[in-house]
Amino acid sequence: MTVRLRQAGFEAYLAGGCVRDVLLGRAPKDYDVATSATPDQVQALFPRTVAVGAAFGVVRVLVPGPEGDVAVEVATFRTEGPYEDGRRPSSVRFSDARSDVLRRDFTINGLLMDPETGEVLDYVGGLEDLRAGTVRAIGDPRQRFEEDRLRMLRAVRLSAELAFRIHPDTLEAIREQAPLIRSVSAERVYEELSRLLVSPGRGAGLRLLEESGLLRELLPEVAAMRGVPQPEEYHPEGDVFEHTVRVLEALRDPTVTLAWGALLHDVGKPLTYEVRERIRFPRHDEVGAQVADQVMRRLRASNEQVERVTALVRGHMRVKDFPQMREAKRRRLAGSSEFPELVELLRADSVASHGDLTVYEWIQAWLRERASEPLRPARLVTGHDLIALGLRPGPVFRDILDAVYNAQLEGQVKTRQQALALAAREVQRRAAGGEAPAGVEPHG
Ligand code: ATP
Ligand code: MG
């Protein structure tokens, strides 16, 4: 790709994040090429292109790879005009390799590489910062963050992903200008925070968000966990914020949902803190789920994502009672879509506090014993059967079906005949105005 551009007489380099990742021995997420060729010239050289941002000089070129086509963004060397809105430049001008590097955000993202020879062009000291593990703004950090406020969050996210420190001057500039982060769109904030939260450095990333002042601006509900004390005996690790950092660290390859669930699982604690004999947080799971709902909606997460995260926050205390639950209740919970993540959250929550994994291991053993059977088998009795028994559809329908299904999950009812017999007894009992028979819960 760069070869063809060069043969046609243009300069061409791999640029930005992919060079950084190749030099670090990491797999690049995507490849970018910077070239002296204009978009028209690029399109003339390659048969399959998409003009994704021709005005900015960007053309997407499809090149065959081992696993299907790979899209490479080929961008003409450019200089950016003044930033007027804190987001994007008012104009761009095609220029040379050096000015193209100077418009980029961090020195480690400012390297150019000739993929044929491995030669690296470094106009900004990026190689040294890469070796030292430093995220440092190119040029004056204050000015660069004022131009594009998202860069402040990119610095923290990058630092978490790479386990790099942020250079003191760059960090100081973020501290000074952190309030400006509020003008960045919710979608972009959510994207960066999500990437930070799933990265291996997520715990340090959360600390850095706090230290930089960005947390207070973006997630005041999470910042409020700092300084909220917890009972020593359950939480030797310290306050609610400290606990949350450690829960994040204890997660293993979390999904975005699980990572947000972990971040927000105790977000109800600052609001429910009280001291009666000892420190307590009554109903902090319920309150926390409401706060989580607000936070996730504010960040414009999808409805599905909002629901899954709030389900984790709402369920994180209940799952601790799993061994004490009735079998039917366990099976209903274990068959729910959030259960695997709820259990992983329980593990991390335990590791990050008292360290007692008894409940987690009990659940693992329980699941192993049932590995070969469906946790929620098909119902032996359905609404059709109740109609056949002469019952008219109504609110009581659901109660009877639940009662029969609970008995099925408990193993008290094993065949369709037994289930139908129980349904018939339930119908009669209700017709006579009686109570549900002892031992069968109406709801799971
Ligand atoms: P990753 O692909 O892993 O997210 P990246 O550094 O490649 O990391 P991209 O968003 O793909 O990030 O951007 C590619 C390059 O474009 C960056 O390496 C950087 O040189 C430049 N860049 C991206 N965003 C900005 C920005 N907001 N301001 C200045 N330069 C940027
Ligand atoms: Mg990239």
Image (cartoon, helix red, strand yellow):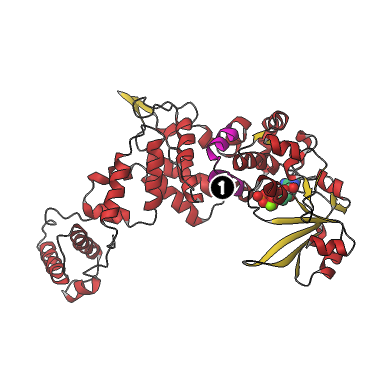
Q: State the residue at coordinates (53%, 46%).
A: 198
Q: Residue furthest front?
A: 117
* Residue 421 vs residue 373, the one in the foreground: 373
Q: Amino acid at mark 1?
A: Ser
x and y percentages locating residue 22 in the rendered image: 69, 49
Quadrant of the drawing holding the N terminus: bottom right
Q: State the residue at coordinates (50%, 56%).
A: 303
Quadrant of the drawing holding the C terminus: bottom left
Q: Is residue 175 above or below residue 288?
A: above
Q: How many marks?
A: 1
Q: Which residue is mark 1?
A: 194
* Residue 216 vs residue 337, the one in the foreground: 337
x and y percentages locating residue 179 in the rendered image: 66, 35
On screen, residue 444 versus residue 238, left or right, reads left
Res 62 → quadrant: bottom right
x and y percentages locating residue 416 in the rendered image: 17, 71
Q: Is residue 425 above or below residue 336?
A: below
First to last magenta residue range: 191-210
Residue 41 in sight: yes
Callout 1: helix, strand or loop?
Answer: helix
Report if residue 441 lies within the magenta region.
no
Q: Residue furthest bottom?
A: 388
Q: State the residue at coordinates (48%, 30%).
A: 242
Res 231 → quadrant: top left
Residue count near mark 1 (Cα–Cα under 10 Å), binned few <14, some 14–19, many ≥20? some
Residue 81 in sight: no
Report if residue 194 lies within the magenta region.
yes
